[in-house]
Image (cartoon, rainbow, N blue to C red):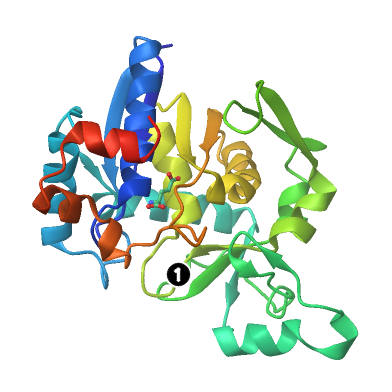
C-alpha cells in the first residue's frame, strides 16, 4: 500500500505558522516514504467557510513549494456519504437524537451529584441527558437534528480494546490502547451529526481518510485525544485504521497554541513582509 498522507485545513481564516509546519511535515514524510501528499478542504461548517480563504490556502501552500493531486476533495461535496453512514449507524441503534444546547450540557454536567465536570476532546463530556429517550430505529434517520454516538450500545460491536499505532508523540513508535469500556468516560457520546451541518468533524474525517486511502494521518497533537473516537468509528464502519503521527504544536511567544485569528502569524502576513518559504521553514524549526 502506498504511503498516503494529507493536510486537511478548514477555509475559515488564514493559514498560520502552525498550518505551515503541519503541511510541510506531512509532505516531508510523504517524500521520505515515496508516498503521496493530498489536500482536503474541511468545509462542513458552511456558516464559516469562505471561498477567499480556500483560495488563500491554495496560494500559500503553492508558495511554500507544496503540490497535491487535483481535484481537491471538499467535504461539502461529500454530504450524501456522511448521511449514508449515519443511516447505517442509526438503523443499528448506535445513534440517538440530542435536544440539548450548550447551556443544558453545562448545567447538567455541573449538577452537584455529578462531581467536577469532566472534559474530553470536544470540551465538556456529554452527561447523557437524551441517551435514554425512546428511539425508533426502524423509522428513517431524523433530519435537522443533532445525533450522538451511543457509546454503550457501540461497545457491543467493538473489540475489548481500541488501539492504534502512534508515530508522532515520543521518540519511538508506540501502540496506544484504551479499554473499550473506558472510551465513554474519556470522550462521552460525541456528536456525529450537527443539527445544521448534516455531519460532524469526527464522522467526516474518518470517512474521508478512508475514501482518500490515507495510510498515515499527520496532524497536531491537539487532536491526539480525539483519535480514540476516530478508531471507534473506523471499527463500527468497517474502515481501515491508519497510522497516526501527532506532531508538536507551534506556539506564540506566550506559549499559547496559534489560532486562526492570530493574523500576526499568518503566512500571508510574513509573505507581505518579504519573507521567503525558507524563512517560514526556519521559523517553525524545520
Ligand atoms: N480540519 C482540521 C483542522 O483544521 C484538521 C483535522 C485533522 O487533521 O484530522 O484542525
Quadrant for residue 197, please give it: bottom left
Please state the horizontal and vertical placement of residue 86, each as a whole percent of the image.
Answer: 49, 55
Which residue is more in the foreground, 49 or 269?
A: 269
Please state the horizontal and vertical placement of residue 242, each as a whole percent of the image.
Answer: 53, 28
Which residue appears at 79% of the width and 60% of the height? 185
- Do we see residue 212 in this rendering? no
Please state the horizontal and vertical placement of residue 202, each as a whole percent of the image.
Answer: 50, 53
In-image side of 265 versus 140 (left or right): left
- Do we see residue 225 in this rendering? yes
Q: Is residue 218 above or below residue 96?
A: above
In-image side of 156 versus 169 (left or right): right
- Label 1: how many residues lie within 10 Å, few (<14), some (14-19) or many (20+)? some
Residue farthest toward the right in the current orientation of the protein: 113
Quadrant for residue 131, please give it: bottom right
Residue indicated by mark 1: 194
In-image side of 73 versus 101 (left or right): left
Q: Is residue 253 above or below residue 209?
A: below
Q: Secondary structure at mark 1?
A: loop
Which residue is more in the foreground, 174 or 83?
A: 174
Which residue appears at 32% of the width and 48% of the height? 17
Say which quadrant the C terminus sits in: top left
Which residue appears at 14% of the width and 35% of the height? 62
Please state the horizontal and vertical placement of residue 118, each as a whole percent of the image.
Answer: 75, 70
Which residue is more in the foreground, 57 or 131?
A: 57
- Looking at mark 1, is its residue's CB closer than 8 Å to ligand 1? no
Amino acid at each position: 500500500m502506498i504511503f498516503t498522507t494529507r493536510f486537511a485545513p478548514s477555509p475559515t481564516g488564514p493559514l498560520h505558522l502552525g498550518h505551515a509546519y503541519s503541511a510541510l511535515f506531512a509532505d516531508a514524510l510523504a517524500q521520505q516514504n515515496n508516498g503521496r501528499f493530498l489536500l482536503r478542504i474541511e468545509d462542513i461548517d458552511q456558516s464559516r467557510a469562505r471561498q477567499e480563504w480556500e483560495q488563500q490556502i491554495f496560494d500559500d501552500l503553492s508558495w511554500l513549494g507544496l503540490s497535491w493531486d487535483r481535484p481537491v476533495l471538499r467535504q461539502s461535496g461529500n454530504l450524501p456519504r456522511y448521511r449514508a453512514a449515519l443511516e447505517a449507524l442509526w438503523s443499528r441503534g448506535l445513534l440517538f437524537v440530542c435536544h440539548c444546547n450548550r447551556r443544558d450540557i453545562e448545567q447538567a454536567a455541573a449538577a452537584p451529584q455529578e462531581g467536577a465536570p469532566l472534559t474530553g476532546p470536544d470540551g465538556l463530556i456529554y452527561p447523557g441527558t437524551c441517551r435514554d429517550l425512546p428511539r425508533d430505529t426502524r423509522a428513517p434517520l431524523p433530519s435537522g437534528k443533532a445525533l450522538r454516538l451511543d457509546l454503550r450500545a457501540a461497545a457491543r460491536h467493538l473489540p475489548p480494546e481500541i488501539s492504534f499505532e502512534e508515530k508522532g508523540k515520543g521518540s519511538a513508535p508506540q501502540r496506544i490502547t484504551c479499554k473499550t469500556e473506558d472510551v465513554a468516560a474519556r470522550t462521552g457520546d460525541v456528536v456525529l451529526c450537527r443539527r445544521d451541518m448534516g455531519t460532524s468533524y469526527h464522522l467526516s474525517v474518518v470517512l474521508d481518510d478512508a475514501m482518500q486511502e490515507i495510510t498515515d494521518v499527520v496532524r497536531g497533537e491537539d487532536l491526539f485525544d480525539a483519535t480514540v473516537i476516530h478508531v471507534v468509528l473506523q471499527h463500527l464502519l468497517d474502515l481501515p485504521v491508519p497510522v497516526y503521527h501527532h506532531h508538536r504544536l507551534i506556539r506564540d511567544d506566550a506559549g499559547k497554541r496559534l489560532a486562526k485569528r492570530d493574523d500576526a502569524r499568518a503566512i500571508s502576513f510574513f509573505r507581505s513582509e518579504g519573507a521567503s518559504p525558507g524563512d517560514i521553514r526556519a521559523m517553525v524549526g524545520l
